[in-house]
Image: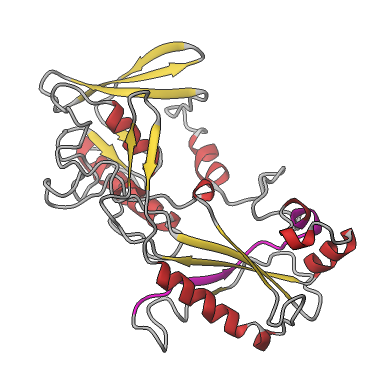
Amino acid sequence: MRCAAFDGFPCLVNGKADAQVICVDPALEHSNVELLTGAFVDRLETNPSGRMVTKVIVTRKGSVEEYSADIVVVSCGAVNSAALLLRSANEKHPRGLANGSDVVGRHYMRHNCSAFMAISKAPNPTVFQKTLALNDFYFRSDDWEYPLGEIQMLGKTDGEMLKGEAPGWAIWKPEFALDFMAEHSIDFWLQSEDLPNPENRMTINPDGQIVLNIRDTNLEAHMRLKAKLEAMLTEIGLHDVLMPRSLYLGKNIPIGGTAHQAGTVRFGRDPKTSALDVNCKAHDLDNLYVVDASFFVSIAAVNPSLTIMANALRVGDHLLDRLGATGS
């Protein structure tokens, strides 16, 4: 359809190459795959030795259900995978499943991100704006020896979006001004690495609620990346509006906008410093795997999705070998 409202919006004709269209829907065509919706996994239970997960306890439509399998794979996202393991604490695993090292929930990472809009001298009628990225400063810059991160385009801003997020100075402006700005907008996304810190962690409070404690890391790199983009605005045809320098409306993405959470169930070769082995199997259990961004030990400065996919395929091959099955 080549619809302009694409990035950040649902597609009514399933035109996006997203997880539902590319992965879930094709998988459901197989008779041995079933998707349960409206289901909440309360906890995992183990056998008396604590080495095997024997039950998956689920609340669905107000009723408690139990499931079992030879191999159990957890893939809830970095926060909720760690939360499930912590909720599943028992006598053999008093700190939570796979948590003999006390790293589950720690080293939470989520990228340092900012979204910006600049105003062009000429109208910007592009439909698919999110097609370019700039990695010239990814590893270092001419004035700093450390990585800065990535600059990429964002989906095109329109007037309705600006009205919903109009900055304080623009609330009183005539409506056409926001539409004019949207027509001339060029939109940027800046992304820098969030460094792993064991004290950046999620825990479960006595009421069972998830508590996230974080302290920002690597902000110097992110500020320098912003400065690099600011210095280029005039050179790429953007002009001064309302301010003595190029108009540059920026906002830092708050924790509620987190999209790239990672690192809470890290893998490694040493059971004392990691929760999972190199095949993403829990060191402390024989049939429990965690396959999402939880296994990351660092997050770099690009979208982690392709790494998550590649690792899932790698672990899938390992599971096929373990089960004595064949696949492609």
Report x, y in % for residue 199: 28, 50
Q: Is residue 136 left or right of residue 125?
A: left
237 within the magenta span: no
Q: Quadrant of residue 195?
A: bottom left
The correct choice, above or below, for 23 with respect to 148 in the image is: above
Looking at the image, which is closer to me, 190 or 318?
A: 190
Number of marks: 0
Q: Looking at this rendering, what residue extends furthest in the top direction?
A: 63
**Residue at (65%, 55%) from the top-left corner?**
7
Task: Name the image colouring.
Answer: secondary structure
Query: What percent of the width, then of the height, locates residue 280?
Result: 24, 45
Q: Position of residue 308 (x, y in %)?
A: 38, 52
Q: Is residue 59 above or below residue 18?
A: above
Q: Is residue 156 magenta?
A: yes
Q: Which residues are magenta?
A: 146-162
**In the picture shown, does residue 164 fall above or below 302?**
above
Q: Residue at x 25, y 41 (%)?
A: 104
